[in-house]
């Protein structure tokens, strides 16, 4: 950074601090003005942050893409090397080793480009993403690593273990001799692993796959469900059935995993009415009921079987208008215990032959909902960080109350506990407690009548481990209060003798302070 440029950056930092309410437009005008004064290019936010030594006051005002860290954990997506699917290729799939990209990806998505630039090296992918996030002002103290690229559980087990170890080496900031050492180091690492998730197919998530993932330190699984109709599975050459989906859900929940289900809109053999029926089934049928969903409108991409059908006039994807209408209807019926993670893929518009080409689909959906007098009550839309950032609403502690909802799922019972501002409908934190089915198979769970804490999460801006923040909602005691209530419900309402937690590696010390001890692949406590 030359002297004139550094002076420009420092002046900008000072002027930003003196007028903290500057809009994005005003900030850009200010950058141009100062750049002209010093005859340099307009500085980027990351340049200003570097010049002021990442002064926390400036960081909080300049943080780019705040949505990345307002849910309490920073997600870091990494991709595995290109590999084939066991069943062949789905009609809509643009990826695979024959085209040099991970299964189901074009390779042009942001995570795909980063992976390719790093040679699909997991260590470099995590390290470069952490550096990138820090450069634009994010606290990277708590991360969830999400492994993308198709069917992780289909890859050779040695590769899976190596991939996980190298991800942990990056967040631990030290190289371990093996996976077991990396997992131990992660418990006290400078960057805490607060979640580990991988995506795979429902038919590749049986008991043995679940146990392998538990041993590696995973806490969640993303299942490529796509539809809930067997005739559609046949048409798209999916290679599994709805029964496989139901079995995967039960295995995952009985092990304590968080489940994110991927669904596609407008597949061959479907239509808007059928898609809405699919979501009603996902939300109400006890065989399913995921914790979160990702919605992907089907796109026509070159090199796919779907493209050939489109050329023949045998297939037509949803228009943007149709996709908005369907997703808006889904948002009207989504239960408050489900999080809608995404509503479209990160595929560059030039690659889309036909289908939704707008990149602001979520915004269009929310505008339609608002125009009809509705609002989405999914977890994401009610999280304290999102509500504060987008609506300027700050919950009042005196309005925050405990809420409890129970529902049957996968032959067991789910208890959804949450602390919410009941006046403004803002979610502060949640806990998912499961009373497992009679098919639970992990010895840690079957030893005594047990309950499992699958998820415990307090939302808002990331607050570092061991710190408190006047503005943040983490570390104010909501997590421990949710845990105490879950223990009471397990003991008094379900006669459980033991409560287990599928803990992320970097959170085990927190649970130890709450009276839990290591128990096989879980943390647990006996209930008196």
Image: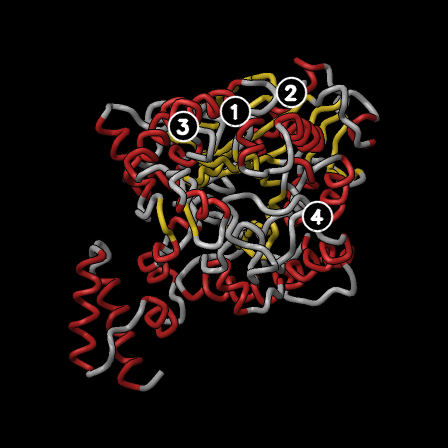
Q: Circle 2 is placed at which residue position?
A: 488
The answer for how far apart the CA atoms under marks 1 and 2 are is: 30 Å
Q: Which of disc 3 and disc 4 is earlier in sequence?
A: 4
Q: Which of disc 3 and disc 2 is earlier in sequence?
A: 3
The answer for how far apart the CA atoms under marks 1 and 3 are is: 16 Å
Q: Circle 4 is placed at which residue position?
A: 154
Q: Circle 3 is placed at which residue position?
A: 271
Which numbered marker is on residue 282?
A: 1
Tag in front: 1 or 3:
3
Q: Residue at x 36, y 24 (%)?
A: 332
Q: Position of residue 52 (x, y in %)?
A: 35, 71
User: Is the Cβ of the residue at disc 1 closer than 8 Å to that at disc 4?
Assistant: no
Q: Residue at x 36, y 61 (%)?
A: 59
- Using residue 65 as the reference point, say whether residue 250 is left or right of it: right
25 or 513, nearer to the observer:
25
Circle 3 crowding by C-alpha within 10 Å: few under 14, some 14–19, many from 20: some
Circle 1 crowding by C-alpha within 10 Å: few under 14, some 14–19, many from 20: many
Q: Position of residue 406 (x, y in %)?
A: 56, 17
Q: Is residue 511 visible?
A: yes
Circle 2 crowding by C-alpha within 10 Å: few under 14, some 14–19, many from 20: some
Tag in front: 4 or 3:
3
Q: Which of disc 4 and disc 1 is earlier in sequence?
A: 4
Circle 4 crowding by C-alpha within 10 Å: few under 14, some 14–19, many from 20: some
The answer for how far apart the CA atoms under marks 4 and 3 are is: 31 Å
195 or 232, nearer to the observer:
232
Tag in front: 1 or 4:
4
Q: Is residue 196 visible?
A: no
């Amino acid at each position: 950074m030359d002297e004139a440029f550094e002076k420009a950056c420092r002046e900008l930092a000072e002027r930003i601090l003196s007028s903290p309410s500057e809009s994005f437009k005003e900030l850009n005008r200010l950058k141009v003005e100062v750049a002209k004064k010093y005859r340099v290019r307009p500085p980027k936010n990351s340049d200003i942050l570097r010049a002021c030594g990442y002064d926390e006051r400036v960081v909080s005002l300049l943080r780019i893409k705040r949505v990345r860290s307002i849910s309490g954990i920073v997600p870091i997506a990494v991709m595995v090397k290109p590999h084939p699917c066991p069943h062949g290729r789905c009609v809509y799939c643009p990826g695979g080793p024959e085209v040099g990209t991970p299964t189901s990806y074009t390779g042009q998505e942001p995570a795909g480009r980063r992976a390719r630039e790093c040679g699909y090296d997991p260590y470099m992918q995590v390290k470069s993403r952490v550096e990138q996030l820090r450069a634009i002002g994010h606290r990277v103290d708590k991360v969830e690593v999400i492994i993308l690229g198709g069917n992780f559980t289909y890859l050779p087990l040695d590769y899976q273990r190596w991939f996980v170890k190298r991800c942990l080496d990056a967040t631990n900031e030290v190289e371990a001799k093996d996976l077991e050492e990396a997992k131990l180091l992660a418990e006290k690492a400078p960057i805490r692993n607060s979640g580990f998730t991988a995506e795979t197919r429902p038919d590749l998530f049986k008991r043995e796959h679940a146990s392998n993932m538990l041993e590696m330190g995973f806490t969640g699984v993303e299942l490529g469900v796509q539809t809930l109709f067997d005739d559609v599975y046949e048409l798209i050459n999916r290679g599994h059935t709805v029964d496989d989906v139901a079995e995967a859900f039960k295995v995952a929940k009985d092990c304590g995993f968080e489940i994110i289900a991927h669904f596609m809109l407008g597949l061959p053999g479907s239509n808007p009415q059928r898609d809405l029926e699919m979501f009603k089934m996902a939300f109400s049928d006890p065989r399913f009921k995921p914790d979160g969903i990702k919605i992907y409108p089907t796109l026509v991409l070159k090199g796919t079987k779907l493209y050939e059908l489109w050329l023949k006039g045998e297939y037509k994807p949803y228009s943007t208008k149709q996709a908005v209408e369907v997703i808006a209807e889904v948002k009207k019926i989504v239960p408050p215990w489900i999080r809608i993670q995404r509503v479209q893929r990160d595929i560059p518009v030039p690659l889309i032959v036909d289908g939704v080409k707008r990149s602001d689909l979520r915004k269009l959906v929310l505008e339609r909902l608002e125009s009809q007098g509705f609002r989405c009550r999914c977890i994401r839309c009610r999280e304290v960080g999102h509500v504060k950032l987008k609506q300027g609403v700050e919950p009042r502690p005196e309005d925050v109350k405990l809420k409890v909802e129970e529902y049957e799922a996968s032959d067991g019972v789910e208890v959804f506990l949450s602390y919410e501002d009941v006046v403004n409908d803002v979610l502060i934190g949640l806990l998912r407690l499961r009373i497992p089915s009679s098919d639970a198979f992990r010895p840690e769970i079957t030893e005594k009548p047990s309950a499992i804490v699958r998820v415990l999460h307090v939302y808002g801006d990331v607050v570092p481990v061991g710190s408190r923040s006047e503005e943040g909602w983490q570390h104010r005691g909501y997590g421990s209060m949710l845990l105490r209530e879950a223990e009471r419900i397990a003991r008094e309402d379900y006669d459980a003798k033991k409560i287990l937690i599928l803990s992320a590696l970097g959170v085990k010390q927190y649970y130890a302070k709450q009276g839990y001890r290591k128990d096989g692949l879980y943390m647990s406590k006996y209930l008196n």
